[in-house]
Every structure is written in structure tokens, then in C-alpha cells.
Image: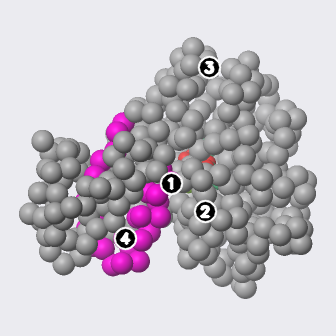
Amino acid sequence: MNTLHLSDSPADLAVAARLLREGEPVAIPTETVYGLAADARNEQAVAKIFAAKGRPQDNPLIVHIGAWEQLRPLVKGIPPQAEKLAEAFWPGPLTMIFKRSEIIPSGVSGGLDTLAVRFPAHPVAQALINQSGCPLAAPSANLSGSPSPTTAAATAADMDGRIAAIVDGGDCQVGVESTVVSLVGQEPVLLRPGYVTAEQIAAVCGSCHIDEAVTSQLKAGQVAASPGMKYKHYAPKARVVLLDGPAAAITDYINAHAEAGVFGLVFDGEEKGLTVPYLTYGARSDEEAQAHAVFEALREADRRGAKILYTACPRTDGLGLAVYNRLLRAAAFEVIKLV
Ligand code: TXA
Ligand code: MG
């Protein structure tokens, strides 16, 4: 398949909207990461998303809307906490989980009776939802298991030849996927950390429980609250190892393990003294910069042929938790504590 490379000009957006209406998947920019979008009501279109990504059928998709009023028909009931969270954070990088209505085929939700919905802030995403007239099911536009793409070029590296078109809307501002919070039970449950933090959700709702799978590995036989959490995720080809400790200890550890193919991924300003090739991903105290840079850094490590990527471990609160959660999965939970 020849994949069209479209810009965000009005003429190109009209082409993308037509392809979406016709049931073709199109990669689109959002403020978090690029998404691989298709009409959520069209089972064949949704099947093409799973095929293009090589995504397991039981891993549910997020449906994207372009206005608050578009939510009601997709779900069975909107809890008061969802209205409050929408007022605070929509449009934006927050996904909420509701009971699913019959308009959306169960395959979108991997057979679950719930549905994840997000109202993205990116103007191109909003324009495509509203011009196509389709609620858009859209997972991240990477091959299943790879780091999410935050540029059109990274999207093309995974999706060229597999989908109808890619719309280039520039770099994604946030850089990690949306926060996923379930509102199906009494208390909000954070299933995936993102730019909207657990602390911010608790401030709006009174509390926010963090699902244990956010920071720990599922035990054998345990059922995942969010099916995405049970798969290997965000992983570059290089083996990622997280190093948790101060700059000097990280530098010493990496240098002591220097050999061909070993790279460092450290915080800006902490690269001094490294004797191996390295990348940086934002300052130690700048979680926004880390979120923005982390996935592209993992992809760049692969492009440069890294075999082992020793990575400085981010904080585990606030937005740091989102970066930590992605790197922990990229590292298959391999963390070395240094003092
Ligand atoms: O920022 C984002 O959320 C991006 C952009 C494109 O909007 N999308 C995205 O989608 O990250 P995806 O498919 O890569 O990740 C969706 C996550 C998965 O971990 C999935 O298991 C979880 O959300 N999820 C979706 N529907 C769910 C549901 N009904 N119940 C529990 N978890 C759900
Ligand atoms: Mg994904």
C-alpha cells in the first residue's frame, strides 16, 4: 500500500477526513503522541488498525471525540466525577473509562463492556474528528510493543506501507500518552499515568487510587485492569536498564560496564565524565522535558545501534510517574538501585 504523506493544510485535511469516512486508517497528530485513527463505529476500519499495528485483539482502543456533546451517545451514563474532570482537563491529555453503549462495536474495547474516551486538545485531531463526522478509535501509531511515535517521521518509520495516510502536525507537545482513569467504580482508579497527574485528579475528585500495575509487574494469572499493561511495551530493540541514583553513581556504573553497543541515556547536564556514547532526555528536575523527549530518545538509541541503554531513572511522583511507568516497561522492570 502506498501511504500518502499529508500536511495539515485545509486541502490535505479534507483528503484525510474523506479517507476516515471511507473506513481507512489514518495516522494523526495529537498533543500526546501520534494516533492511528479509524471510524470507531466501523468494524472493518477498526480491524485495519489492529492489523497495521500487529496489536493483540484483546487490547482495547481509546475513542476520540471533538466536542463534549459527542460523549453521551457512546457511553451508558456520565458519572458526576467525569463531568468535573472534563471541566478541568478536556480538551486535553486525559482518557476516561465509562460503560460502553451499543453504538461502539465490542471489538473496539477488546470485548470489554467499558469504553475509554478522550477529547484531544490538538487542533488537527479536533478538525479531523469534526470534519469526518466520525468518533475516532486511535491507539498510538507505533507497531505493537515499540515506543510511541511523537513525530510524523517516527510514525512513518513504523507505518509506511501499512496504512492509507499520515498527517504531519509537527512534534507532539506532551510526548507521553494520555492519563487513563477509570470512573466505572466508586473511586477514580488511575490505570496509566500521564500529563494529568494522580495528584491533580485527586484534587478534583477527592481521591484517586493508583492501580498497582502502574509501578509493578503483574503476577502470573493476575487479571490486568487495563489490558495494555500486561504486554511488553514501549521497548526499543536495545535492552534498557534503569539506574536509580545520583548522577555520579550513574556515571561510574555506566563507565564500569563500558563495551561495544553500550549507551547512556542520562539527564541533561549529567553527561560529563561518561566514556560511552550517550543521549540525554531533559534535566533531572524537568519532568515536562523528560516526557517530551523520552520516546524519541529510545528510537534514536535504536537508530544509532545501541545494544544496551543504561538509563537514568526519573522521579515516581507527579508527571515523573508517567515517564517512570514507560521506562519501567521499556526496561521490562529491570531497575538497579545505586547510592
Ligand atoms: O494519548 C493517548 O492516549 C494516545 C493518543 C493517540 O490519543 N492513544 C493511546 O492509545 O495511547 P493506546 O491504545 O496506545 O493505549 C490505550 C491504553 C491501553 O493501555 C489500553 O489497554 C487502555 O488504554 N484501555 C483502553 N480502553 C480501556 C478500557 N475499556 N479499560 C481499561 N483500559 C483500557
Ligand atoms: Mg500504545
Mark 1 or mark 3: whose residue is earlier in sequence: 3
Q: Amino acid at mark 1?
A: His
Mark sitting on residue 171: 2
- Distance from disc 2 to disc 1, alpha carbons, whole Å, reads 9 Å
- Distance from disc 1 to disc 3, alpha carbons, whole Å, reads 25 Å
Mark sitting on residue 204: 3
Lateral position of residue 13 relative to residue 286, left or right: right
Q: Give the residue at the far bottom of this rendering.
A: 2
Please provide the residue range marked out in magenta.
Answer: 291-316
Q: Residue at x 14, y 74 (%)?
A: 259
Using the rendered view, name the quadrant where residue 152 is placed.
bottom right
Residue 338 higher or lower than 265, as above or below: above
Q: Are marks 2 and 1 in contact (CB under 8 Å)?
A: yes
Residue 163 higher or lower than 198, as above or below: below
- Distance from disc 2 to disc 4, alpha carbons, whole Å, reads 18 Å
Q: Helix, strand, or loop for circle 1?
A: helix
Mark 1 or mark 4: whose residue is earlier in sequence: 1
What residue does disc 4 label?
301
